[in-house]
Image (cartoon, grey):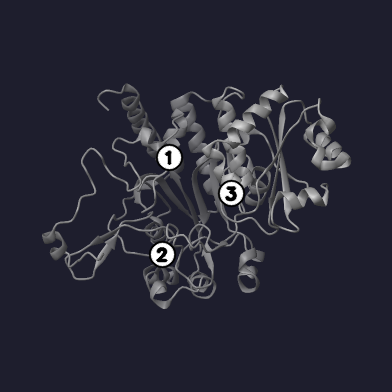
Amino acid sequence: IRHDKTIRDALRFRSKAARFIRDHLADQHGFEEFETPMLFKSTPEGAREFLVPTRDPGMAYALPQSPQQYKQILMASGIPRYMQIARCFRDEDLRADRQPEFTQVDLEMAFASGEDVMRTIEDTVKALWEALLDVKNLPTAFPRMTYEDAMSKYGSDKPDIRLGSEIRRIEYMLPQDLIMKLGPHTDPYVDVMKIPISEDAGETRKFITEFMDSPEAQPFIQNPDGQPGIFPFDTRRPLQGLQPFGFEAAEQVEEMLDLEDGDLVILQARPRGPFTGGSTPLGNLRLALHRAAVKQNLLPKPTGFEFLWITDFPLFTPSSDSDAEPGQGGTAGLSSTHHPFTAPKTPADVDCLLTDPRAAKADHYDLVLNGVELGGGSRRIHSAAMQEYIMRNILQMSPARIEDFAHLLEVLRAGCPPHAGIALGFDRLVAVMLGRESVRDVIAFPKSGRKGEDLLVGSPTQMTGDQLRTYHLRLEE
């Protein structure tokens, strides 16, 4: 910090942003700030927790993944509008946009819908951008896109729409022999996209050859659904370089994608079925190729701020076997896509809880900016009966796990108004505003390495024998 003015400037900018958000939400929207406890209890919200042992044998607190349950309790306690710039903790592997401890702008509104929350956030974000960045041309209302459209058009639930290169399905156009060469599936969906790398097909061919020989290409080469089919469009070659498509399909694809010399045409097969998760292999390849082309000055670096709401997520997702995402620990093979307190979107989605839970849509919304998820929120379940039904009958959580939420269920039974809220990742928000690649660049003392170490002070540290005895712990090999 002492030797790098850009870090000091970023930290000062962060301070101004926090102060502005607090004042704007209070003065313009009537929010009040309440602090919620840092020493919470272990509840299966979705991520892995940090436990804090006590001197009482076998007893431990958990650091909060978010203030979610406390703020819902506040809604039932006569607090109409809550906000907090909250510290949160999740025991996750580090990435450029993740830290084990992080800050979020947390808010909740009683007698409100998701629409009310989205309008509040749009107003706050536009005011923040104007005050700190002098950006005055943001749209009155941010565009919206469903999860299904985002995944099908961009292969991501947080698409950077500045890049273009929309994805389309074309298996109905392609000859069967080409489809069979794309992967192991006998009747797959096949997606296509184009990336205008260069006006020179030779330069495009050189670029893609180098990329596919690089380590960045390994995940796409090893994709169990098959490698991508890659075709530089070249008018000097037979069928413009699309010979495997056959005459009719080549002509249709050329017209559909409006192809020109040097464009890169990419095919990818995937199994039939609904989208799950946050991205597809082709969506990831779209981003990787754009990054590589920008790095080689073949494409300009994208500029501007393109906000987008992603809506209509599935309420439930097939459970992951990953230890990093333990979900809610139920036995149904399903996890709540976001957390188990999210309400179904419509009465028809409520009906799906009884007939086909996988088809139910959530009243959830993510705010995305330039391919970064700034935050997400939802309308919450305010009925104890529905909340318990989802935990017990749909997620099939054990009685012991449901008992972990007894405090929340009791509050809901006592009466709770309809309410909705959101949490914005404050570290990510500041990093995007300043154009920084990593949240570490806007945090005073970030954690580093795979284990989340603070290299300055040398934490975490090995527990001593006395500490282990004090907290009634022992180490196992």
Placement of 102 over or under 194, stated as above or below: below
Residue drawn at 59 percent across, 31 percent down:
210
Name the residue beneath numbered marker 3.
222
Question: Few, some or many C-alpha atoms within 10 Å of disc 3 (few <14, some 14-19, many ≥20)?
Answer: few
For residue 23, side relative to residue 62 (left or right): right
For the residues carrying marks 3 and 1, which lies nearer the camera in this image?
Answer: 3
Q: Which residue is mark 1?
A: 96
Where is residue 427? Give x, y as percent: 40, 39
For label 2, count other residues whose C-alpha is less than 10 Å away and answer few (under 14), some (14-19) or many (20+).
Answer: many
Residue at the right extreme of this rendering: 248
Q: Nearer the viewer, mark 1 or mark 2?
A: 1
Q: Amino acid at mark 2?
A: Pro
For the question of whether residue 197 can be seen, the reply is no
Query: Which part of the image, by quadrant, shows the C terminus?
Result: bottom left
Left or right of residue 360: residue 409: left
- First-in-chain label (1 vs 2): 2
State the image quarter where residue 79 is shown. Answer: bottom left
Q: Nearer the viewer, mark 2 or mark 3?
A: 3
Mark 2: which secondary structure? loop
The residue under label 1 is which amino acid type?
A: Ala
Task: Say if mark 2 contacts mark 3, CB within 8 Å.
Answer: no
Q: Which mark is residue 44?
A: 2
Please, what secondary structure does the residue beneath circle 1 have? loop
> At 71% across and 22% down in the image, what residue appears?
200
Q: How many marks?
A: 3
**x 48%, y 32%: residue:** 127
User: How far, Cα to Cα, is label 3 from label 1?
Assistant: 24 Å
